[in-house]
Amino acid sequence: FGSSTLRVLPDGDLLIANSYRDEVFRVDPHGRRPERTLRVRSPLEMAPVPGSQTLFFVTSQSGDIHLADLASGDVKIVDTGNLRLGGLAVDPVRRKLFVGVPGRSAVHSYDIGASGQLSAHTTLATNIAQPTALAVDRCGGLYVAGADGGNVRRLGPQGGAAVVVARVPGPDVTSLEFGPGKQGWSGDSLFALDTSSGSFYEIRIGR
């Protein structure tokens, strides 16, 4: 698939973003791929719209944030900034979208409308080195990591100072995710992937 990222959908299908072919598509557990392919220029990260089974935010290397509808195949740009985008995370309770902007060492936030529209674009924090991995806890705290010497930082729901809460040996964390609390994956742990060393870490955080 070339340079790809993926998410597991509630029904067990995989949603795959293939940046080499400018496409987003789903694959079922048997490897079958539906005919419908969503066209997104150089897709990077994906995050679900709260309360929807079919709407996803998709960032692209062009700096745009797209809203993709798996049911209809429709894709539209909901924000554009000509910025190199990094990590992506959603707070489903407070309906917030968080986006890392590595080129500006910043994290931006948006309010999410009922249909996935974005508003209230603000800079939540600055001086955050290479925010390429984001995750949100139950309290709305935002965890940020990247090419920052293995530091994992936490921001409050309203931003403010970023506090280092953990440090892993890997220097280039590209993915952060809380465990689902099922099949041995602790719901109180943050899992971090460092692609430079190929290492995978469990961080006991609590949610």
Image (cartoon, rainbow, N blue to C red):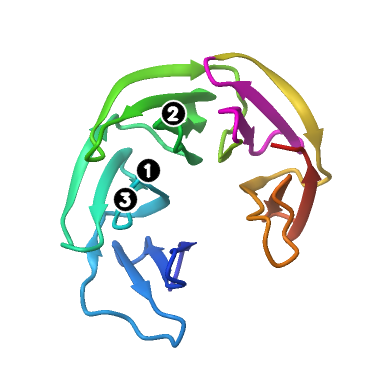
Q: Which residue is mark 1?
A: 50
Is 151 covered by the magenta stretch? yes
Q: Residues within 10 Å of mark 3 (few under 14, many from 20)?
A: few
Residue type marked 2: Arg
Relative to the observer, which residue lies in front, 91 or 32?
Answer: 91
Distance Cα–Cα, label 2 vs label 1: 9 Å
Q: Residues within 10 Å of mark 1 (few under 14, many from 20)?
A: many
Dot 2 or dot 1: first in sequence order is 1
CB contact under 8 Å: marks 1 and 3 = yes
* Residue at image location 76% in from the left, 25% down from the top: 164
Residue type marked 1: Pro
Res 52 label: 3
Location of the N terminus by quadrant is bottom left
Q: Seen in the image, is 164 located left or right of residue 141?
A: right
Distance Cα–Cα, label 2 vs label 3: 15 Å
CB contact under 8 Å: marks 2 and 3 = no
Q: Position of residue 29 (x, y in %)?
A: 46, 82
Relative to the observer, which residue lies in front, 162 or 83?
Answer: 162
Q: Position of residue 20 (x, y in %)?
A: 36, 65
* Magenta range: 138-158
Where disc 1 sits, the SS reads: loop
Q: Which residue is mark 2?
A: 94
Can the viewer see residue 202 in this picture? yes
Can the viewer see residue 60 in this picture? no
Q: Is residue 164 above or below residue 181?
A: above
Q: Position of residue 5 (x, y in %)?
A: 47, 60
